[in-house]
Amino acid sequence: MKVKVISRSTGEFTRERSQDLQRVFRNFDPTLRSQEKAVEYVRALNAAKLDKIFARPFIGAMDGHRDSIKCMAKNPNYLKAIFSGSDDGDIRLWDMASRRTVCQFPGHQGAVQGLTVSTDGSILVSCGSDCTVRLWNVSDANVADSDYLSDNSAKPQAVYVWKNAFRAVDHQWDGDLFATAGAQVDVWNHNRSQPVNTFDWGSDTTISIRFNPGEPNILATSANDRSITLYDLRMSSPARKVIMRTKTNSIAWNPMEPMNFTAANEDCNCYSYDARKLEEAKCVHKDHVSAVMDIDFSPTGREFVTGSYDRTVRIFQYNGGHSREIYHTKRMQRVFCVKYSCDASYVISGSDDTNLRLWKAKASEQLGVVLPRERKKHEYLEAVKNRYKHLPEVKRIVRHRHLPKPVYKAANLRRTMIEAERRKEQRRKAHSAPGSIMTEPVQISLKSVYEMRLRRHAKFSNVPLPPNKQDNYQYYIKLKLGTVPACNLHLYVQNHQPQPALNRKHEISPASVK
Amino acid sequence: MAAFWNSFDSEISGCDCLGDSHLRQAPGDSIASVPYISVTMAAKKENSDDEVDEKVKKYLRGEAANLEGVKDKKLKGQLAVREDLYGKSAKTAAKIEKWLLPSEGGYLEAEGIEKTWRIKQESIAREVDILSSRNQYDIVLPELGPYTLDFTSNGRYMAAAGRKGHLAIVDMKTLNLIKEIQVRETVRDVAYLHNELFFAAAQKKYPYIYNREGTELHCLKEHGPVLRLQFLKNHFLLASINKFGQLRYQDVTMGEMIGNFRTGLGRTDVMQVNPFNGVVALGHSSGTVTMWKPTSSVPLVKMLCHPGPVSSLAFHPNGHLMATSGRENKIKIWDLRKFEVIQTLPCHAKTLNFSQKGLLAAGTGSFIQILADFSGSQNYSSYMTHSMAKGYQVGKVLFRPYEDILGIGHSMGWSSILIPGSGEPNFDSWVANPFETSKQRREKEVHSLLDKLPPETIMLDPTKVGTVRVPQKKEKPTKKDVEAEMEAAIETAKDTEFKKKTKGRNKPSKRAKKRREMIDKAKRPFLEQQTQEHETSRKKQKTNPETEMPKSLQRFVRQKAT
């Protein structure tokens, strides 16, 4: 007979001295834990509730400006510094950790419209409605200065006066060029008092400008004529253009996927585009109830923050149709500029009420040092929540946000209006001959650019337009090239984009029409 | 989206093989006699591969989801990554088993012509260490019996209740009597709550909750004269069945009564909780076994198990096996996934209990039999037997968790015998720790309260939690329903009050006309729907026989009388 029974001596399973840690034994056998899934679900539910309880995103306001804040700039070289410029011509450097002004940059007459910092963080460029571009030297000394009480004010390194007021400025990545937007797009060098290059497409004012972080020679602008234009500095003329239904207030490139950019539009939405395929937006980000004023991508490229005229700040996933988060306070007014901090954990908003506000990017994230066990627990809860996020109860709790009453009402109204419009469209379609009503995409694409040109062309040259709208495009192409098979249109557009034919200066002469 | 849910569903609900670990083959007995070393090595490797596969299967908790139907490429990719991760983690868990689970389980192997069921407790006592042999004892308390027992989930403490009002708490590690009280009335059952600090005793008129010091904390009057008590530790529910056949659930954290159901099948004292899903099973005198959950007043399952009264029942810890015994001297083992009898054994049992490793103890009179299936084919056969002193009537057998020990409550006190191979050798400190300190106990109490499950999570298949119910086909409203609806609509149209209009528009004739119009308007959708249905059905009738035939022959089709 061979026999063995379980026999545990206490010494083997308990600690030897009282200073020791308790001994832990694990057995991951599923039969020891009954109803694992139900337990996980309950944990997910509790985690979702706790997240709601701990959601305290607002850290503090930075008070000091005397007029509404128009623009901000991050210092890529120094994590806790941020520059802000206001309507009264004041530029300030803030220390986000202590939430105090470190340094002031006086000089602008009238509003500061654009701020940007060179990639090495040494030069601040500002431009304003006083038709000047000012370059400021930002030394490490005044960034890291701890003496807040002394009234630090800097003198500009250079002041360049130009012909018209500026609306925006952006610095090239890894280079010494910067571009200003205004009546036209000017490209400047640090050391030259006049622009080295000037672009122009269309007659309206350009209102925002942003360099591509991956390809330093490409920049995107938006203008008052509802267009978004892409420029390549290596070419003498603009590269591409999209015309939207409403104007775009700001543009941000995705730093991790530099071919994509997102445009903050006046029609409450943001549109993500692939710069290589401007025919249609990759994603439409809806949720704001008023014009979106500014947008900034997180350095991770997975999220971006938007500030809106509806007095809220929202955070979107780069591919999410609706916002992940909404931030608002009772005192925050129209938000004109937002920035994601360089470590992707904070969001800064500047608004009409002369304050900068500092927010956490993840509302319920624990600040400070997190112990490894705590971190593991957070990760576990996050994973469980992710696993059960589709279930109605968890979903409801995770999605719910308290909205300010005006925003709530406006969102409801907007929803009703859109729904009514959609219904009307549907009915019209149902009662018309099949195929006679085409649904247009939200944005007018390149095709429409051609159409517009054609109309202008027809107007000036008295060429009759073809009756059907659908034929316009082909007709135009025929006009241009004589015979182009319809299937190659796309190719044509892709390849011949930057040719002067597209440019307004080189309009087609009536003589070339057969 | 539908495809997504389906796939999710199959991923989650495909966990049927979860409990198949008891199908595992007994390792290491086929290779001992092979003479060639190389062959032995190969066989060993193969065998160990099989073993690892079995282990991985245990940790996989079901088959992988079938992703073929998923149309969303992105989702498919994500799910594939997730599945890959599950597979990897199961493999790792199986691999690290040898370090994490150092203790081997107990065993009893016969040599030569010995038979395991002839081995006596005395001979086992001679072979095992002193610590284990201390666990064989009889406590003789002839005046206050018969006794019933309950262990805490970590097996450290035991509560014993004598019929004549004797309640005792014993620390099984040190065999110290912690507290002993005499309640001076009949005690029918005792059950530990979530830890050793509280226990409930079913007394003559009501059940009571006591703490470790023997202080009465609560009298649960709503339960009435309770015969059996069971505690659902994941849900913090105390389930009781009383003399009138009423099943009650009470939440012991908030004191709320969760469910109160009349079984309608008479008095019974056979009640057992299925540890796998929290379903309470009752055995009735009619031979039926009913299974209940606290959120429905009708039983989930009603199965006729025996021709005579059910005398006891027990659940395998993996939840897929149930053993029932009837007065007609039969023990039946059921597969709860199919609700089918797997095996019928010809012996009587007053009490049954499954151990953590799946041994089945059956007690009747003064005789206890342990059944086991080492073959892996769910074929239970006699493993050990134990006879108590003549005249002892066994009332309750209960395996002690995480130990190779069987506790026996009988008419003359309680006893403890060694059953090698019955308990789980490796405990998990976070699930149930026999060496728990008071600080750990306090922490665990908080955690288990945070993870307390709502009563709705009790269901026959607990893996269904978190899946989406497939939408049922919408039932067509009957003709009567439609008519009733139309009537109601007409009534509301008739009852509407008109505004007082200006002179000339308020004439009775105009009002009557308006009312008629309104009634017609209310009727119209129903009538339209009727005609539409009629038309479609006519079309169907028309098309059916005629489309099959060439046109020239259609005139010969016999018209059906409509």
Image (cartoon, grey):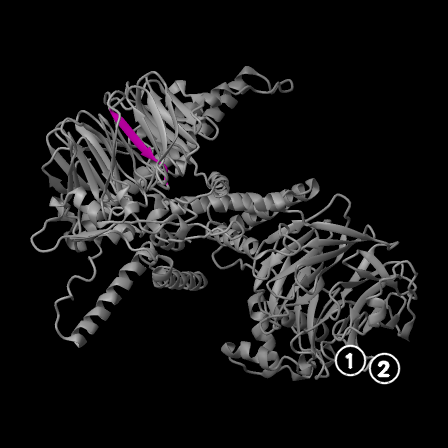
Q: Residue A248 at what x, y percent from top left?
A: 70, 62
Residue labelled with disc 1: A176
Q: Is residue B216 above or below residue B172?
A: above
C-beta proximity under 8 Å, tags 2 and 1? yes
Query: Where the C terminus of chain B falls, by quadrant?
Result: top left
**Magenta stretch prevailing secondary structure:** strand
Using the image, name the chain to which the residue with label 1 belongs.
A
**Left or right placement of residue B397 versus residue B434 in this view:** left
Tell me which residue sits at (48%, 23%) in the image: B493
Secondary structure of the residue carrying numbered label 2:
loop
Q: Between residue A181 and residue B45, name the one nearer to us.
A: B45
| Residue B32 within the magenta-colored segment of the rendering | no
Number of callouts: 2
| Residue B152 within the magenta-colored segment of the rendering | yes
Q: Is residue B231 above or below residue B424?
A: above
Q: Residue A297 at what x, y percent from top left?
A: 66, 64
Q: Badge 2, how many Cα within 10 Å: few under 14, some, many 20+?
A: few
Q: Residue B67 at what x, y percent from top left?
A: 36, 61
Q: Is residue B118 above or below residue B89?
A: above
**Left or right placement of residue B134 versus residue A91 in this view:** left
Tell me which residue sits at (27%, 27%) in the image: B147
Secondary structure of the residue carrying numbered label 1:
loop
Q: Residue B346 at what x, y percent from top left?
A: 9, 37
Is residue B227 visible to the viewer in this orientation of the structure? no
Residue labelled with disc 2: A191
First in sequence: mark 2 or mark 1? Answer: 1
Using the image, name the chain to which the residue with label 2 belongs.
A
Chain part drawn in magenta: B146-153
**Left or right placement of residue A500 versus residue B377 in this view:** right
Query: Where the N terminus of chain B falls, by quadrant?
Result: bottom left
**Left or right placement of residue B195 versus residue B352 in this view:** right
Q: Between residue B347 and residue A263, name the one nearer to us.
A: B347
